[in-house]
Amino acid sequence: TLGSAGFLSVFAVVNAANFKDEETWGAGRALSALGVLTCVAAFATMVWQSVGDNPSTAWVLAALFGGVGALEVAYRTLGTKGPRKRRS
């Protein structure tokens, strides 16, 4: 479940980035949008199924994505190479 959640999340983000920067990659925006929607739907279905089978799975997934989000915020605000750092 965690491996699938990670894969679907990364694949959705890649498709969203491709949707945003369509000119650089040359792929159609419709195909990228479909990829994002499909990944989100598959992720939601997987979470629904997992929580129905074992409710503690929701806490594990929430902790995983919460931890990743916290690390991302910390990197962008405290890191030396984050995209939000100003150049001197």
Image (cartoon, helix red, strand yellow):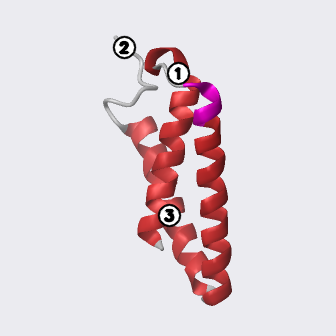
Which residues are the magenta region?
28-32
Q: In this view, does 87 lie to the left or right of 19?
A: left
Mark 1 is on which residue type?
Answer: Asp
Residue at the spot 54% in from the left edge and 46% down from the top edge? 12
In what element is the residue under mark 1? loop
Q: 38 or 50: nearer the eye?
A: 38
Mark 3 vs mark 2: in front: 3
The tag on residue 5 is: 3
The first of marks 3 and 2 along the sequence is 3
Q: Name the residue under label 2.
A: 87
Residue hosting label 1: 21
Cα separation, mark 1 vs mark 3, equals 24 Å
Q: How many labels does the image show?
A: 3
> Going 39% across and 38% down the picture, which residue do you hit?
78
Q: Distance between the residues labelled 3 and 2?
A: 35 Å
Position of the C terminus, as image quadrant, is: top left
Residue 74's x, y, as percent?
44, 45
Q: Between marks 1 and 2, how big is the CA–CA gap?
A: 24 Å
* Sooner in the amino-acid sequence: mark 1 or mark 3: 3
Q: Is residue 73 above or below residue 3?
A: above
Of label 1 and label 2, which has the lower sequence position? Answer: 1
